[in-house]
Amino acid sequence: MGGRSAEREVSLSSGHECVTALREMDYDVTAIDAGQDIAERLMESSPDVVFNALHGRWGEDGCVQGILEWLRIPYSHSGVLASALAMDKARSKAAFVKAGIPVADGGLFSRKEIESGHVMTPPYVVKPNNEGSSVGVCIVPERANRPPDIDGGMPEPLMVEAYVAGRELTVTVKGGKALCVTEIITDGWYNYDAKYVPGASRHDLPANLPDVITEACLAHAETAHQALGCRGVSRIDFRWDDSRGLQGLFARETNTQPGMTTTSIVPEQAALRGTSFPELCDWIVKDASCER
């Protein structure tokens, strides 16, 4: 847990929650805050299984998975290739398109290109190509006179996508099976604070949606999980413009290391299907392996 990404604090929170749950299930747990000495720490600990509660770069993009494969330590969630694909928004969108999953128009651009002039007609969204938790997301409104100023710390290239108005939906996939659809209700954009500050957003589950939208979300989520080669638990986010019916539903991205905090979607959806948080963590451990 922890690590060096922009999602470090959320990862620490997820890790602490999972440590508590696993100890409740009688596991002997060693919490490791992942640093540059992670390989040495793992060899010293000599664990039977690694529960990966890292979020963001290095922990969710195939890097730590590669270390675990090299050390031959069974680990949770997705493997090297699926993690790398899902974390790279451009490549995961290409996989979605090939699998028949609808996505918003967009592409990759440099900071200079984005700041020099509108690279697509507003409204549009600018975000890092390889971060999660809405880190660095910038929305350019419909009547914006000038392009956005980009944080100099954002890694290039950047993803620019057409803004999809409407409702925020998300689906957990556990062992290849979609659990349910949650609608996330917030006063503004579903940003970092809305995701992790208690009370900043409300989760409606199962979401009150037309059957055709619910069925499409569940089917697309399972297809995305399979298309990327995900394992264990994943979560896929959607935007739905309800004025356009089924044509207004677009997949945004798959999270291979979804949050496991007290405000997180995955534990809520699992609980709705009769699996407590400790039982969910127990299932994730028992699902662990190498060569994922």
Image (cartoon, helix red, strand yellow):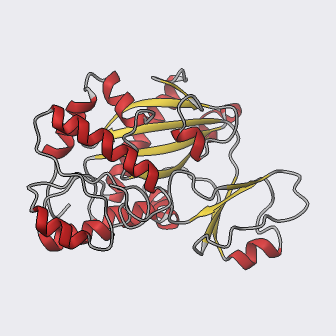
Give the quadrant of the N terminus: bottom left
Percent x, y for residue 121? Answer: 80, 60
- Seen at 72% across and 68% down, the residue is 150
User: For residue 38, which quarter of the picture?
Assistant: bottom left
Query: Is any atom of residue 174 visible in this view?
Result: no
Question: Image check: 207 left or right of 80?
Answer: right
Nearer-the-camera pick, 207 or 209: 207
Query: Is any atom of residue 64 visible in this view?
Result: yes
Q: Eyeballing the image, is 237 above or below 90? A: above
Which residue is outermost to the right? 145
User: For residue 268, which quarter of the picture?
Assistant: top left
- Seen at 11% across and 44% down, the residue is 28
The mark tally for this picture is 0
Percent x, y for residue 263? Answer: 45, 33
- Seen at 36% across and 41% down, the residue is 260
Give the quadrant of the C terminus: bottom left
Percent x, y for residue 276? Answer: 26, 26
Percent x, y for residue 219? Answer: 40, 39
Question: Image check: 266 left or right of 20?
Answer: right
Nearer-the-camera pick, 221 or 13: 13
- Seen at 33% across and 68% down, the residue is 35
Q: Eyeballing the image, is 167 above or below 55? A: above
Question: Image check: 41 left or right of 229?
Answer: left
Question: Image check: 144 left or right of 76?
Answer: right
